[in-house]
Image: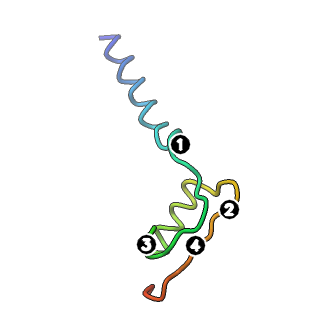
Amino acid sequence: MKNGICVFVLFLLLFLNYESTFSQPLTGTKTIPGDYATIKTAVNALNTYGVGAGGVTFIGKESIRN
């Protein structure tokens, strides 16, 4: 039983750390829509992953409407 709990805790820690370990900061030029469907999803990604070296530029196309 103790081994099962240890395995579960290890799995939980790995799962919770997955996104921060394997996600990359945003860099380059991103289009909305294109790379991101909406401005909101682009901002969410920016807040989640941050900005990498060299920065990131978002280009909005004419089809964006609220």
Mark carried by residue 34? 3
Give the camera-side residue of 26 and 42.
26
- Residue 29 x %, y %: 58, 68
Nearest to the eye among marks 1 and 4: give it. 4
SS for callout 2:
strand
SS for callout 3:
loop
55 is higher (above) or lower (below) than 59: above
Q: Earlier along the polypeptide chain: callout 2 or callout 1? A: 1
**Dividing the picture into quarters, in which one does residue 26 lie?**
bottom right
Left or right of 42? Residue 4 is: left
Q: Residue at x 45, y 67 (%)?
A: 35
- Residue 19 x %, y %: 48, 43
Display colour scheme: rainbow
**Marks 1/3: CA distance?**
24 Å
Left or right of 60? Residue 4 is: left
Q: Earlier along the polypeptide chain: callout 4 or callout 3? A: 3
Q: Residue at x 56, y 77 (%)?
A: 59
Q: Residue at x 51, y 68 (%)?
A: 42
Q: Which residue is mark 2?
A: 55
Q: Which residue is mark 1?
A: 20
Nearest to the eye among marks 2 and 1: give it. 2
Amino acid beneath label 4:
Phe
